[in-house]
Amino acid sequence: MNDNYLPILQVGNVLLSADIITELFCCDYDTCKGICCVEGSDGAPVSLDEIDEIEQSLDAVWNDISAQAQAVIDRQGVAYIDRDGDTVTSIVGGKDCVFTCYENGYCLCSLEKRYRKGKTNFCKPMSCRLYPIREKRFSNDMIGLNFHRWDICKDAFKKGKKENIRVYQFLKEPLTARFGEKWYEELCVLADEIGKNQQK
């Protein structure tokens, strides 16, 4: 496949860029220490249903988040509308997600932390779980998935190459949670076909 030409693929009602299948990527948390929770100028995209889930999880995570984050939530809630008109999680000081907490120099998501301990039924926004994939909805019930490239993830490219893990493989759990097991199986079949064609 020509690296300068990345075709749009389709699985069910989902359109996805080919680099989701071809690109090698695996988060290197020990190196980046979760910096994606605090970098950027806006929060994580969230749906209205996710806002409800987050609000129901607030009591469980409240003591994990900073006093500044608590103040932001008290003032404007768990989410706001950003400059692009998207609903995103609230942030502290134009940077940190309000649900960021710190342990031993690592950034953690307080929502996921409590979920892993069985204290809440909500893990974290799907946009976070799917990263580095970004999702876009179209008016005809189609969904678009694009691979988002960010400089802070440079070590993830290195680890992906070292361990031979591709984006869709690294994100098996969230992709399955979002689109279902059958959809993910069809994606794997497509990926195998593309791999075989590349070898010819």
Image (spheres, rainbow, N blue to C red):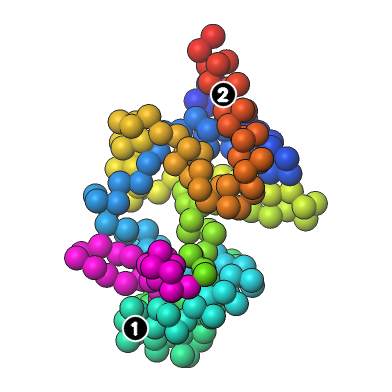
Query: Decide: marks 2, 1 in contact (CB < 8 A)?
Result: no
Disc 2 versus disc 1: distance between alpha carbons?
46 Å
What amino acid does circle 1 point to? Asn
Residue sitting at x 61%, y 40%: 184
Q: Quadrant of the N terminus?
A: top right
* x, y percent for residue 111: 43, 70
Look at the image and say whether residue 82 sits in the magenta stretch: no
* x, y percent for residue 156: 34, 42
Residue, far front: 118
Residue sitting at x 69%, y 36%: 10
Residue toward you, 69 or 92 = 69
Residue corresponding to mark 1: 63
* x, y percent for residue 34: 32, 58
Query: Looking at the image, is 105 positioned above or below residue 24?
Result: below
Q: Which mark is residue 22?
A: none
Residue, far left: 104
